[in-house]
């Protein structure tokens, strides 16, 4: 390779930075969010650098973003997969938001992200990608399904030149410098807010069913819907944003603030302001209008849970819901912290012992005197092997639905008497011709590989 070759990792980092720049010019409050996030992370590092970096280096966390986009069909999703494939990002996880509380959303989603630990460490950029399900009769009748599909089939989200560059980049795992520049230019332009006129009547018809349906099927392009920085202390972030006069949604989604280890994912957001858009009115005239569809989100990440851990987590969330319903005046945060204290282990070690969270292992440089313990458990318990938590790299459907819902104007409408089209990860994989990977399999493989590496190393010593 010549020195001007841009590999997939560098391409991904450059794309993430470029999108961040674009989104900052489009949504100025995002720039404030990034500034405040950096202050919050600096404070967390000053308090305790070791704890702050337990789930990723400060360099990784500072650069870390996730974006969200929404598309209309499997054909479009397959094209998205090609663009992100060029950046070393692969479809991971399947989320069905159509039966989500507090509000059903007519989409199924996946996230494109790097899957290898060193790639995540180099740049963990990920994009939550939702696809409309026009076939779902609970939301759309047959006539509207046909018109929606017709509208979506007639548009092109990505120019052919971009898709061809993407395919080449994926095969060659990067691009020469001029092609890389061109790829980045075309890719970021594909996610910019468009000034194509929005058909007011069509948009309005879809919006009565779902604001998300209108945002996807009511316009001729896709756009980056939010871009989320990662913080080390989301409670500090929430307070700091409100102090700056930015009104946040009423709470932080996901696990409560508590004394034990951070689990999974906590997120919160603020509603972006209205943005000017061009509209075509029913009388054919074209003029300025406004839409309010994009927002700012921020997140804090915790340890990945095993399926058993996820069951404990889900049971705790159900218990919080139950107690909150019994005591509608009580603060959810307080109830949740109480439930957590009762149900969730307070240390990483106990999470590991009970098989509730994923860890990798490291043989200590200084190992104890005496015979080698005979079980892996004892190697950990007796101080031969250290546990290192695996950070949760994915999303939570309930938080996702909460984020969607808190940023919609109307509640939409749904006919629950109708059947919904069946969708799952296997269906999505077939549609896009790529395997949608399951997060828990990736975490489990990483943990297992590290356990074997420790045993091999121990045998050599
Ligand atoms: C995606 C909402 C989900 C998250 O972080 O859970 C999401 C969207 O609004 O398109 O991004
Ligand atoms: Ni998000």
Image: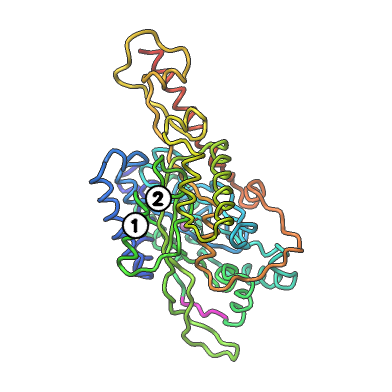
Q: Which residue is mark 2?
A: 300
Residue lying at 47% horizontally and 35% vertically, measured from the top left:
345
- Along the horizontal axis of the image, is 395 left or right of 46? right
> Which corner quadrant of the image does residue 120 belong to?
top left
Residue 217 magenta-drawn? no
Near mark 1 (Cα within 10 A), the count class, few <14, some 14-19 or many ≥20, is many
Q: Where 414 falls versus 348 (above or below)? A: below
- Residue 36: where, in percent of width, then height? 30, 59
Whether residue 15 can be seen here? no
> Which corner quadrant of the image does residue 373 belong to?
top left
Q: Secondary structure at mark 1?
A: helix
Q: Which residue is mark 1?
A: 237
Q: Quadrant of the C terminus?
A: top left
The one of 102 and 87 positioned closer to us in this rendering: 102
Q: Quadrant of the N terminus?
A: top left
Q: Are marks 1 and 2 in contact (CB under 8 Å)?
A: yes
Q: Is mark 2 within 8 Å of ligand 1?
A: no
Q: Secondary structure at mark 2?
A: strand
- Residue 47: where, in percent of width, then height? 25, 45
- Residue 125: where, in percent of width, then height? 41, 51
Which stretch appears magenta?
Answer: 195-199
- Along the horizontal axis of the image, is 282 left or right of 346? right
Tag of residue 287: none
- Along the horizontal axis of the image, is 339 left or right of 427? left
> Which corner quadrant of the image does residue 273 belong to?
bottom left
């Amino acid at each position: 390779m010549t020195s001007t070759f841009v590999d997939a990792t560098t391409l991904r980092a450059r794309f993430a930075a470029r999108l961040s720049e674009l989104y900052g010019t489009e949504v100025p409050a995002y720039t404030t969010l990034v500034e405040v996030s950096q202050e919050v992370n600096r404070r967390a590092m000053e308090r305790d650098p070791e704890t702050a970096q337990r789930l990723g280096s400060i360099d990784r966390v500072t650069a870390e973003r996730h974006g969200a986009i929404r598309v209309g069909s499997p054909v479009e999703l397959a094209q998205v997969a090609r663009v992100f494939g060029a950046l070393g990002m692969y479809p991971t996880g399947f989320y069905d938001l159509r039966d989500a509380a507090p509000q059903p959303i007519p989409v199924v989603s996946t996230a494109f992200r790097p899957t290898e630990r060193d790639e995540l460490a180099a740049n963990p950029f990920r994009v939550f990608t939702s696809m409309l399900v026009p076939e779902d009769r609970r939301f759309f009748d047959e006539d509207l399904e046909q018109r929606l599909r017709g509208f979506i089939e007639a548009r092109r989200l990505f120019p052919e030149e971009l898709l061809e560059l993407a395919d080449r980049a994926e095969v060659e795992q990067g691009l020469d410098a001029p092609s890389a520049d061109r790829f980045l230019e075309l890719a970021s332009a594909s996610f910019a807010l468009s000034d194509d006129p929005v058909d007011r009547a069509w948009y309005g018809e879809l919006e009565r069913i779902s604001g998300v349906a209108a945002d996807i099927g009511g316009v001729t392009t896709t756009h980056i819907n939010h871009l989320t920085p990662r913080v080390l202390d989301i409670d500090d972030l929430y307070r700091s944003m409100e102090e700056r006069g930015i009104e946040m949604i009423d709470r932080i989604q996901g696990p409560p603030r508590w004394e034990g280890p951070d689990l999974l994912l906590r997120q919160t957001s603020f509603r972006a302001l209205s943005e000017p858009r061009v509209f075509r009115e029913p009388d054919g005239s074209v003029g300025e209008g406004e839409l309010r569809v994009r927002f700012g989100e921020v997140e804090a990440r915790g340890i990945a849970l095993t399926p058993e851990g996820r069951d404990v987590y889900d049971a705790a969330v159900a218990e919080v819901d139950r107690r909150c319903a019994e005591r509608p005046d009580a603060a959810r945060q307080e109830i949740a912290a109480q439930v957590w204290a009762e149900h969730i282990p307070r240390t990483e070690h106990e999470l590991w012992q009970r098989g509730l969270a994923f860890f990798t292992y490291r043989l200590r440089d200084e190992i104890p005197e005496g015979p080698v313990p005979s079980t892996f458990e004892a190697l950990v318990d007796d101080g031969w092997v250290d546990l290192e938590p695996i950070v949760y790299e994915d999303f939570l459907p309930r938080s996702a639905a909460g984020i969607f819902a808190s940023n919609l104007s109307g509640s939409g409408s749904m006919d629950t008497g109708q059947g919904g089209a069946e969708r799952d990860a296997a269906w999505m994989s077939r549609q896009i011709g790529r395997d949608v990977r399951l997060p828990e399999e990736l975490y489990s493989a990483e943990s297992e590989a590290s356990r074997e590496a420790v045993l091999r190393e121990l045998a050599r010593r």
